[in-house]
Image (spheres, rainbow, N blue to C red):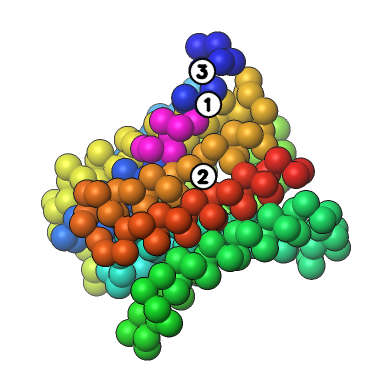
């Protein structure tokens, strides 16, 4: 494929990411769906590890941290989707992450945000507030769902930063990716077994079609973005990737028949605009 195909490839990845999340939201046993997805990750990671150079020893702390963060993220994702609407929670989770990364850079790494990036974070925050308030001030019964979505955004930011450092420390991007998926998959399967009181069998029997489809979609989306990053402009790719936020809002409104579609779509578009500004201001 040529460089001109990059926008279409990244948009396809964004669509796949939103769709697999919608599948997890819609399945009756979400924990079973997550277990099946991670079975796909283990198979893929284990197979890839046989054919690529292993990551350097310096990448091990990053791999372990990434597996822990990914496990927390997926379990919290299951929790969030059991509490609220997909068209609200997915955009909150995905939109929180870029803002958290930018703010961590300013506060922890002591890299003050330029005016353009500060304005972008403000726009993202406005959109997130709109998503949280689109149905009015959240009641006590809605706060756990919004809190879980915000927590997911923080975890996404965490593993994004960790994996960026891990790939550099590994001296083998393919090796890092293989072991990232392998360890992540094993960690999530162990966590599901713990939640299911020591056995994976029920989880691996149920939700098979959704889990396998979701796992393949997730891997395909990841692969498409990795390819795009090798030939395209990184800030533009990062911004295009987050069009999944608007796609998720549309899925929530048009497919899942969730309420408040127009206002939620406008808030999601505001988050997307802020992310695009943030990436292009780098």
* Residue at numbered disc 1: 7
What percent of the width, then of the height, locates residue 90?
A: 41, 57
Verify whether residue 44 appears in magenta. Answer: no
What percent of the width, then of the height, locates residue 158?
A: 60, 59
Circle 3 — which element? helix
Most extreme residue toward the front, as rendered? Answer: 262
Judge from the rendering whether residue 210 lies leftward or rightward of residue 192; answer left or right: left
Q: Which residues are magenta?
A: 10-16
* CB within 8 Å, label 3 to label 1: yes
Judge from the rendering whether residue 98 lies leftward or rightward of residue 25; answer left or right: right
Which one is in front, 128 or 90? 128
In the rendered view, tell whether residue 242 sits above or below residue 6. below
Circle 2 — which element? loop
What percent of the width, then of the height, locates residue 130?
A: 49, 67
Badge 1 or badge 2: first in the primary sequence: 1
Verify whether residue 14 appears in magenta. Answer: yes
Task: Say which quadrant the C terminus sits in.
Answer: top right
In the rendered view, tell whether residue 119 sits above or below residue 238. below
**Residue 60 in view, yes or no:** no
Labels in figure, total: 3
Q: CA distance from mark 3 to mark 2?
A: 17 Å
CA neighbours of label 1 inside 10 A, class few (<14), some (14 to 19), many (20+): some
Q: CA distance from mark 3 to mark 1?
A: 6 Å
* Residue at numbered disc 2: 242
CA neighbours of label 2 inside 10 A, class few (<14), some (14 to 19), many (20+): many
* Residue at numbered disc 3: 5
């Amino acid at each position: 494929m040529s460089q001109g195909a990059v926008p279409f490839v990244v948009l396809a990845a964004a669509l796949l990411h939103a769709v697999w999340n919608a599948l997890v939201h819609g399945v009756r046993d979400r924990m079973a769906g997550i277990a099946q997805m991670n079975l796909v990750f283990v198979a893929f990671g284990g197979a890839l590890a046989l054919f690529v150079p292993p990551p350097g020893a310096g990448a091990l702390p990053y791999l372990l941290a990434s597996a822990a963060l990914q496990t927390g993220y997926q379990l919290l994702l299951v929790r969030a989707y059991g509490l609220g609407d997909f068209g609200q929670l997915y955009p909150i989770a995905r939109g929180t992450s870029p803002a958290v990364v930018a703010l961590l850079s300013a506060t922890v790494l002591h890299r003050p945000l330029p005016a353009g990036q500060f304005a972008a974070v403000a726009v993202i925050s406005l959109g997130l507030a709109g998503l949280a308030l689109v149905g009015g001030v959240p009641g006590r019964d809605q706060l756990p769902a919004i809190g879980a979505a915000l927590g997911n955004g923080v975890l996404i930011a965490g593993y994004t930063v960790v994996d960026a450092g891990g790939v550099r420390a590994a001296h083998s991007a393919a090796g890092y990716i293989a072991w990232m998926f392998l360890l992540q998959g094993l960690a999530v399967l162990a966590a599901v077994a713990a939640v299911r009181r020591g056995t994976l069998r029920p989880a691996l029997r149920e939700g098979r079609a959704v889990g396998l489809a979701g796992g393949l979609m997730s891997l395909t989306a990841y692969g498409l973005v990795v390819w795009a990053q090798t030939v395209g402009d990184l800030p533009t790719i990062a911004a295009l990737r987050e069009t999944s936020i608007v796609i998720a809002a549309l899925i929530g409104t048009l497919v899942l028949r969730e309420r408040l579609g127009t206002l939620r779509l406008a808030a999601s578009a505001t988050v997307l605009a802020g992310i695009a500004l943030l990436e292009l201001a780098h």
